């Protein structure tokens, strides 16, 4: 005759299978926990990474844009929504020398559009590599010195490779660099120098683009660092008043960042509170169910005792059962989360109005591993009390019949 | 030679505000190969005494000595090991684990400690001896009360104990079957194992070497 070796592991799995219905519920609970735990952390971490990337990229104190286009400019920067708005050249040069400015550099935003003249619709951003202090340092990492005439640097999500030639607004550009992902509008933008951008603007006007001012030197916005002794609000008021006839709007990046950070913090607090609550709830529910089960199993454990099992052995069986349950739950939950999250990560990012950037592999691994471990811990933690108590309960129950 | 020496053992319990003795000043000596029966009314303390002897319950007073070792001097690990290796305990009532097959139930005491070898052959022999070899791979839910009782007897013998304790092992068996069980205990005793059986049935007493009576916790 043959039998399976009856180790603690074996006995535990048998016990779990015997109470299949209850075991499935417990496993589902832990799966739900690990799903929420890891999902919430991934989301929070992606938003944090996105915000950090944004404040790294937005190194200016303020942006000067045509009044009424503040939200469009914000949309272009944060979400890459193609937009076109312009100052004429004369106003631009006056703005560059306005009071309270310590540093200033112009940008030109041009939207390409779906047509036979363009490979695709993107936001074209013209900047001046010699004066720019916002994107130039970052672009210089990809292409030292920035793009020369007719050269283009493309954002991470733009379809194209270094060495390729792209057609935008009927002109050809050589791709000389491709940027890392930022989680902002820059990912769907392309960068050219200001002279090339002026040519592109003429292409744009020729192809029917609206609002293009006459004459040379038009720009869309001016990135500004405010002088030390001037407060942001004073500066903004000064510009709005000084250029009241020309309708100049001021976009303060700190307040833009501040509102993003504020949203993010609220969001993070809610996520954290939910996760802590769910974790405690899981441990609590498991502990109650384990201890109820234990009451039903007094007799069973009494028999083990009568046959010579130590208290330790009983505790081992109980803990092993709880580990199997929480481990299965945690693995299932994590697997489901990975299936639900990673293929749709980009979609999730797009549907949230916050800068969203998937963290690097190390952080991802830490979140997955940590979430798995925390979920797995719920089982043994919840079973601890039962495991300690069982030794004394079991002894008393053995002599009562049919319990 | 004395294998088991129970000396003036008492167990005191509290019921409401009052204290009472479930076992009072009980003494008993048992040698290898001896077969002793204990009878007594329900509630007279028989199971309590057996649990104390098996080291499952500490006595309030007195001492139990097994093979020159005082049980209260042992820690849980040593006491459990002693119970596993030296004492076969057949608890009162149903004591077969529902999630294991009959054969696995019988083998369970063997597997509670790291051991080499396969207990299945010996377990199969024991099942044959108690007449249920054909049920080896059935689950307890498919067995009758009498068959379950025989499973727990076979299980009590699987580690070849030096002392076999049985708490009403013939409780739900008919005459023929309970005679069979008592004959088996006789044979076990003849092979050198000390056997201590609690029973209600006076007919069973003819099998044992000695008969003790328990009344209100007192053993006479
Ligand atoms: N943990 C306990 N606390 C209080 N009283 C107890 C406890 N365990 C047993 N008793 C009491 O001790 C007495 C002896 O119980 P025991 O189970 O030993 O009787 P018994 O002789 O085996 O009876 P039966 O023939 O019905 O099995 C009973 O009156 C019982 O109520
Ligand atoms: Mg009893």
Image (cartoon, rainbow, N blue to C red):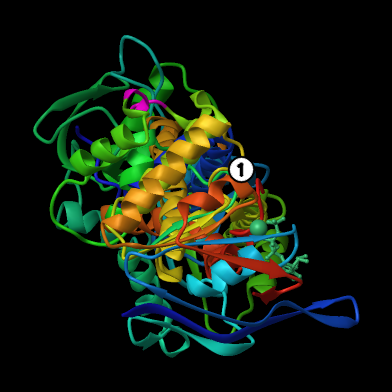
For the N terminus of chain B, the image quarter is: bottom left
In this rendering, would B13 be left or right of A356?
Answer: right
Relative to A156, does residue A82 appear above or below in the rendering? above
Residue A218 belongs to the span the image colors magenta: no
Relative to B123, does residue A58 appear above or below in the rendering? below
Q: How many marks?
A: 1
Is the stretch drawn in magenta largely helix, strand or loop?
Answer: loop
Relative to B195, does residue B152 appear above or below in the rendering? above
Instruction: Please name whichever residue, A86 or B218, is drawn nearer the observer in this view of the structure.
Output: B218
Residue B134, how many percent across, how many down? 33, 23
Residue B136 belongs to the span the image colors magenta: yes
Residue A383, how many percent across, how many down? 54, 61
Q: Give the quadrant of ligand 2.
A: bottom right
Mark 1 element type: loop
* Magenta-drawn segment: B134-138
Which residue in the structure is indicated by mark 1?
A: B171
Instruction: Please name whichever residue, B63 or A387, is drawn nearer the observer in this view of the structure.
Output: B63
In this rendering, would B68 be left or right of A87?
Answer: left
Residue A2, how many percent across, how many down? 20, 34
Task: Tell me what residue is drawn at x 39 percent, y 71 percent.
Answer: B80
Task: Tell me what residue is drawn at x 30 percent, y 47 percent.
Answer: A6
In this rendering, would A386 be left or right of A41?
Answer: right
Viewer can see residue B214: yes
Instruction: Please name whichever residue, B187 or A167, is drawn nearer the observer in this view of the structure.
Output: B187
Task: Tell me what residue is drawn at x 19 percent, y 39 percent.
Answer: B121
Relative to A120, does residue B61 appear above or below in the rendering? below
Instruction: Please name whichever residue, A299 or B23, is drawn nearer the observer in this view of the structure.
Output: B23
Q: Which chain is disc 1 placed on?
A: B
Circle 1 Cα neighbour tier, 10 Å, few/some/many (<14 / 14–19 / ≥20): some
For the C terminus of chain B, the image quarter is: bottom right
């Amino acid at each position: 005759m043959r039998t399976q070796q009856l180790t603690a592991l074996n006995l535990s799995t048998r016990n779990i299978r015997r109470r299949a219905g209850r075991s499935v519920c417990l496993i589902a609970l832990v799966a739900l926990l690990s799903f929420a735990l890891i999902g919430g952390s991934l989301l929070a971490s992606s938003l944090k990474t996105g915000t950090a990337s944004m404040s790294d990229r937005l190194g200016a104190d303020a942006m000067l844009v045509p009044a009424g286009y503040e939200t469009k400019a914000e949309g272009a920067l944060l979400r890459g929504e193609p937009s076109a708005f312009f100052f004429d050249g004369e106003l631009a040069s006056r703005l560059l020398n306005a009071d309270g400015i310590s540093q200033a550099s112009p940008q030109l935003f041009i939207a390409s559009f779906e047509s036979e003249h363009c490979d695709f619709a993107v936001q074209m951003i013209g900047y001046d590599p010699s004066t720019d202090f916002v994107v130039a340092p970052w672009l210089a990492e990809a292409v030292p010195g920035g793009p020369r005439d007719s050269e283009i640097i493309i954002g991470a999500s733009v379809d194209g490779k270094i060495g390729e030639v792209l057609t935008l607004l009927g002109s050809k550009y050589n791709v000389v660099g491709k940027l890392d992902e930022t989680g902002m509008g820059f990912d769907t933008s392309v960068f050219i120098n200001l002279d090339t951008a002026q040519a592109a603007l003429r292409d744009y006007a020729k192809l029917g683009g609206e609002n293009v001012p006459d004459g040379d030197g038009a720009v869309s916005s001016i990135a500004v660092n405010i002088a030390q002794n001037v407060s942001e609000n004073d500066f903004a008021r000064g510009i709005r008043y000084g250029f009241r006839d020309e309708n100049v709007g001021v976009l303060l990046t700190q307040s833009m960042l501040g509102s993003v950070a504020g949203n993010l913090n609220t969001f993070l607090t809610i996520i954290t509170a939910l996760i802590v609550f769910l974790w405690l709830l899981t441990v609590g529910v498991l502990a109650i169910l384990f201890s109820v089960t234990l009451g039903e199993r007094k007799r069973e454990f009494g028999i083990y005792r009568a046959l010579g099992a130590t208290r330790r052995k009983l505790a081992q069986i109980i803990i092993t059962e709880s580990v199997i349950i929480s481990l299965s739950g945690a693995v299932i939950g994590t697997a489901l989360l990975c299936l639900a999250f990673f293929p749709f990560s980009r979609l999730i990012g797009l549907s949230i109005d916050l800068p969203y950037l998937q963290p690097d592999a190390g952080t991802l691994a830490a979140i997955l591993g940590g979430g798995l471990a925390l979920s797995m811990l719920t089982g043994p933690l919840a079973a601890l009390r039962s495991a300690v108590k069982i030794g004394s309960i079991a002894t008393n129950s053995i002599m009562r019949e049919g319990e | 030679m004395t294998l088991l020496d129970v000396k003036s053992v008492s167990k005191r319990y509290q019921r409401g505000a009052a204290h009472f003795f479930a076992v009072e000043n009980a003494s008993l000596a048992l040698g290898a190969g001896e077969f002793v029966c204990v009878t007594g009314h329900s509630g007279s303390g028989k199971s309590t005494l057996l649990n104390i002897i098996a080291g499952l319950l500490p006595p309030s007073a007195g001492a139990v000595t097994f093979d020159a070792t005082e049980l209260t001097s042992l820690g849980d690990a040593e006491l459990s090991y002693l119970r596993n290796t030296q004492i076969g305990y057949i608890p009162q009532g149903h004591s077969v684990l529902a999630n294991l097959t009959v054969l696995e139930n019988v083998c369970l005491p063997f597997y509670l400690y790291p051991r080499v070898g396969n207990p299945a052959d010996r377990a199969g022999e024991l099942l044959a001896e108690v007449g249920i070899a054909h049920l080896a791979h059935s689950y307890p839910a498919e067995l009758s009360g009498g068959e379950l009782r025989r499973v727990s007897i076979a299980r009590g013998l699987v580690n070849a104990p030096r002392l076999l304790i049985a708490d009403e092992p013939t409780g739900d068996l008919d005459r023929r079957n309970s005679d069979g069980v008592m004959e088996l205990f006789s044979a076990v005793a003849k092979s050198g194992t000390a056997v201590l059986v609690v029973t209600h049935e006076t007919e069973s007493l003819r099998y044992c070497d000695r008969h003790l009576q328990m009344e209100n916790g007192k053993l006479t």
